[in-house]
Image (cartoon, coloured by chain):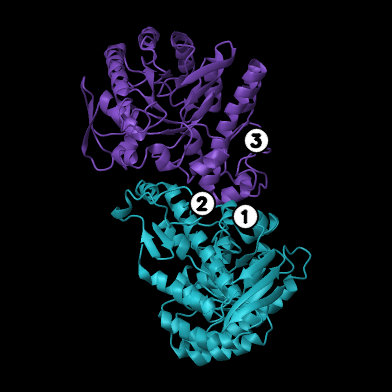
Chain colours: A purple, B cyan
Amino acid sequence: MKYEILKTCGRAKRAHMETVHGTIETPVFMNVATVGAIKGAVSTEDLDEIGTQVALSNTYHLHVRPGDRLIHDMGGLHAFMSWKKPVLTDSGGFQVFSLAGIRKIREEGVIFQSHIDGHRIFMGPEESMQIQSNLGSTIAMAFDECPPALAERSYIEPSVARTTRWLIRCKAEMERLNTLPDTVNREQLLFGINQGGIIEDLRISHAKEISELDLPGYAVGGLAVGETHEEMYHILDETVPYLPKNKPTYLMGVGTPANIIEGVDRGIDFFDCVYPTRNGRHGNAYTHFGKLNLMNARYERDSRPLEEGCRCPACRRYSRAYIRHLLKAKEMLGMRLLVLHNLYYYNHLMEEIRDALDAGTWREYKASALERLNSGEI
Amino acid sequence: MKYEILKTCGRAKRAHMETVHGTIETPVFMNVATVGAIKGAVSTEDLDEIGTQVALSNTYHLHVRPGDRLIHDMGGLHAFMSWKKPVLTDSGGFQVFSLAGIRKIREEGVIFQSHIDGHRIFMGPEESMQIQSNLGSTIAMAFDECPPALAERSYIEPSVARTTRWLIRCKAEMERLNTLPDTVNREQLLFGINQGGIIEDLRISHAKEISELDLPGYAVGGLAVGETHEEMYHILDETVPYLPKNKPTYLMGVGTPANIIEGVDRGIDFFDCVYPTRNGRHGNAYTHFGKLNLMNARYERDSRPLEEGCRCPACRRYSRAYIRHLLKAKEMLGMRLLVLHNLYYYNHLMEEIRDALDAGTWREYKASALERLNSGEI
């Protein structure tokens, strides 16, 4: 793995990262393929067309179905889903702490129930690394606890300490797995995750601790889970400077186009979020002037594309009126076209951001992009 | 419109038909796009890739939503759904008699209730032609009554007589509409429909009557609605010879790959059926050796494509195991890949049929294709 910063502007970084599955140009938005597929009937062939660089899949979901051993035996997640470019897998931690049934947290790990058939599953740092190793993703995420954003210090402090101990175990296990002959991707990279809620000194001390482990990359986790945007930006302002600048930095689960622009400005390289897919499935299209809801009657006879000038597969060919009709008729194609457009929009937004950083016009770009997004001129 | 027979073998015809929306090579299978879209998130861009020649849309569905006036004002169905090639629209009759609420049949037409909001709609031959004219399809179908397949002579005889009277009104109305300046497609073609249940002499006398109207094409309707395959083939044997050979002949709503091969052998040019889309959405893939159900556990670790050697977008890239996983996880992409494969299969089957007719090997092709389909070697 090689990570090279090409340009900076303040804390904003423009970089590229070489992996066994190809180069990632950052800042980048990863497209969420929860169970090894993008929701909305979008194929990996479509992803190539809409400029996706990295797919993000969920360890917990793939562990319970179809099973990470099956995916290992089919040649790993890349072969299984027919996607050659980089894949990042989360650790399963977030789903365990948010989706799964009654759980017990112990030093070893977590006991929880499958959301599919209710069977008891144990997952700790070693198990998460083993599952992600079976999936053979390009980047594996550390197994951490994601505490509620607004939890008290008395809850967060011991949780963060355990997350550090778990990270040390993740690192050791990943190193071991990467030497085994049966491992799908023996160059799998481990990213550590910074936690600490919105308590600045906990975030900072944790960032310092995990930075010492010299991992290939670091994430800021546990944000966008209930705090305000301003609190999130403040935590990034305080924390990111204590993570290694010469390594990729990933802001997990974030966010709106404006959140992403603000994140880049604070030194973030990697983003992911379900908004473009989820909002697309609910009839919303992203544009440079904000979102539009296709269910609105004003689009009934609107022959324009979702966004004028957009080159996505939906806008190249279909009108707002047609897509609205499909949504009203509950035709799957309506959702698919919106998801294609929204992912293209996000991927293209990142390209604009990279172009502005390359051109040395980041500050101007940021100001005008945020202004347009808030203009509501649609 | 120009229809030219290129080859024959017994009653089987290989022809091409020139329309304002391009040439149709027959025998052809029309792909069902009920509300102006193929079910399963398949776009018109996909249709170009899987070799679709003609899309078939439903007049009744488009009339109730989004409304045929809206589609007219958006430039017609071709512009609305972004599809340049031929479109056939049914008359709405079949849906009125099968889907819609309590109805009253009178000489003028039918009163029925919308399946969407229950409002009363009147549709007769003139209304059906006006709606189809608003849609601007390449081929419009006559407004007929489709009686239950096994209805008695006492029901069918007056029904067929009314269908003939309705056809005369359809023809007059279509001629009038095709002269109006505001008409989307002033070269819209009207196909008449033969009815008569499975009562031979009624089928034959009706075929003779409607042939005299010298329409651009004729369909055999009211089959595949409850009778056996043998009864259907027998009716085709008896009836098709009384329809004009030098015009396209369309067997409505049929059918399985074997039904299509038997239909071609009896002089049929045009087919349509919901099987490839509906079966795809239910987890079934068509192959030259019969259907396979992807939900079957035997495919859990099957790394082969749906059919070896198939060049469809699903088989070029994805395994049975992956598609099965998507279906189990209720990911829309699973349905989409199966629908793409099945439509490709049907479109490609028609290409094989045309190739065999062109090459003068129709009898051999028919025998070996039917044998393979029944072999179950999957």
Which of labels 1 and 3 is toward the front?
A: 1
Which of labels 2 and 1 is toward the front?
A: 2
Q: Nearer the viewer, residue A39 or A370?
A: A39
- What type is the residue that disc 1 sits on? Met
Mark 1 vs mark 3: same chain? no
Q: Residues within 10 Å of mark 2 (few under 14, many from 20)?
A: some
Q: State the residue position of label 2.
A: B313
The structure residue drawn at horizontal position 38% and vertical position 8%, both measured from the top left corner, is A208
Chain of the residue under the numbered disc 3 shown in the image: A
Mark 3 vs mark 2: same chain? no
Residue A304, position in %: x, y? 67, 44
- What type is the residue that disc 3 sits on? Ile
Q: State the residue position of label 3.
A: A378
Identify the secondary structure beneath mark 2. loop
In the displayed structure, does residue A73 sit left or right of residue B319? left
* Among the 4 quarters of the image, the one containing residue A35: top left
In the displayed structure, does residue B324 sit left or right of residue A103? right
Asked whether the beta carbons under mark 1 and mark 3 sit within 8 Å of each other, the answer is no
- What type is the residue that disc 2 sits on? Pro
Q: Earlier along the polypeptide chain: callout 2 or callout 1?
A: 1
Structural distance between the alpha carbons of marks 2 and 1:
21 Å
Q: Considering the image in quadrants, where does the C terminus of chain A appear? A: top right
Identify the secondary structure beneath mark 1. helix
Q: State the residue position of label 1.
A: B81
Q: Is residue B102 visible to us here?
A: no
* Among the 4 quarters of the image, the one containing residue A185: top left
Q: Nearer the viewer, residue B199 or B154?
A: B199
Picture layout, residue A71 above or below residue A16: below
Q: Residues within 10 Å of mark 3 (few under 14, many from 20)?
A: few
